[in-house]
Amino acid sequence: MGLLGRAVPSLVVLSCLVLAGCSSSGSHAGGGSAGKNGASAAGPSAVAGSAGAGGSVGEIPVGAGPRSTYTVQEQPPAGSCHYRMEKGEPLEDLKCTPGATSPAVTQANLATTICRKGGYTKNIRPPEAVTGKEKRLNAASYGYTGKMGDAEYDHLISLQLGGDPNDARNLWVEPADPGHKPGSGVNNLKDPVETKLHTAVCSGKVTLKAAQNAIVTDWTTALSKLGLAA
């Protein structure tokens, strides 16, 4: 009786320890499993978010590039585009004219494209028979009512900076600069900025992409943002 009395409590204690151990182990394993599942769920989400933030957002569209034959490109609906003003200068509507680069021009082939001796743009420029019609349509898109001879049908990213020759996203009717005498023809301050950027790209002072981004964002500040003399 004494032995049995002592044995029963021992068995009870042993059973409790075993059960407690299983319960404790199960609880810990469950917590660990939840932790792993939580980390697994958060991991891909964080990676996807990072990729989205640093991916194609803000990237300049890529056009079709030079063609042996050009056709008139469809323009935005009449009145749907609106000029911005910066320092008194008219800027493009980024929704209508976000710019477009040419796939034929890259940082790796500058020496054989835009920086080659003898020039590059002459043989890839669309004919006036095409751009003249596009210019009239684009003037309606922007609501431009001034003299057509004073406005330039401008490549936002110029051909000498690797802009696409005939992508509608890279062309806009650029009004004359403030103070321009009506009827005196095209004379825009954006043109010398493009030339200075071209020189900087070909001399290795700035990258092609940096120059393209600067001209699309705001050509009036492009040189200063890149640390180039105006």
Image (cartoon, helix red, strand yellow):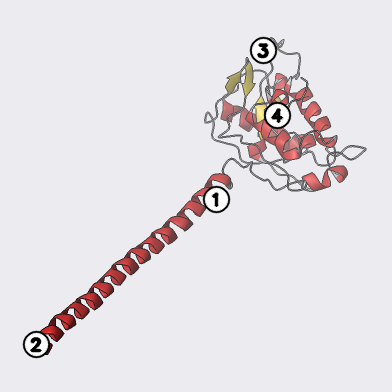
In the structure shown, which secondary structural element does the residue marked by tag 3 occupy? loop
24 shown above or below 143: below
Q: Quadrant of residue 145?
A: top right
Q: Earlier in the sequence, mark 3 or mark 1?
A: 1
Please give the name of the residue rendered at 41% of the width and 63% of the height, measured from the top-left corner.
36
In the structure shown, which secondary structural element does the residue marked by tag 2 occupy? helix
For the residues labelled 1 and 2, the Cα–Cα distance comes to: 74 Å
The one nearer the camera, 16 or 44, is 16
Give the labeled residue for mark 2. 2
The one nearer the camera, 34 or 188, is 34
Please give the name of the residue rendered at 89% of the width and 40% of the height, measured from the top-left corner.
116
Give the labeled residue for mark 3. 178
For the residues labelled 2 and 3, the Cα–Cα distance comes to: 113 Å
Numbered tag placed on residue 219 in the rendering: none
Q: Earlier in the sequence, mark 1 or mark 2?
A: 2
For the residues labelled 1 and 4, the Cα–Cα distance comes to: 37 Å
For the residues labelled 3 and 1, the Cα–Cα distance comes to: 43 Å
Give the labeled residue for mark 1. 51
Q: Quadrant of residue 28?
A: bottom left
Give the labeled residue for mark 4. 153
In this rendering, does residue 163 appear at all? no
Q: Earlier in the sequence, mark 2 or mark 4?
A: 2
**Which label sits in the foreground, 1 or 2?**
2
Q: Amino acid at mark 4?
A: Tyr
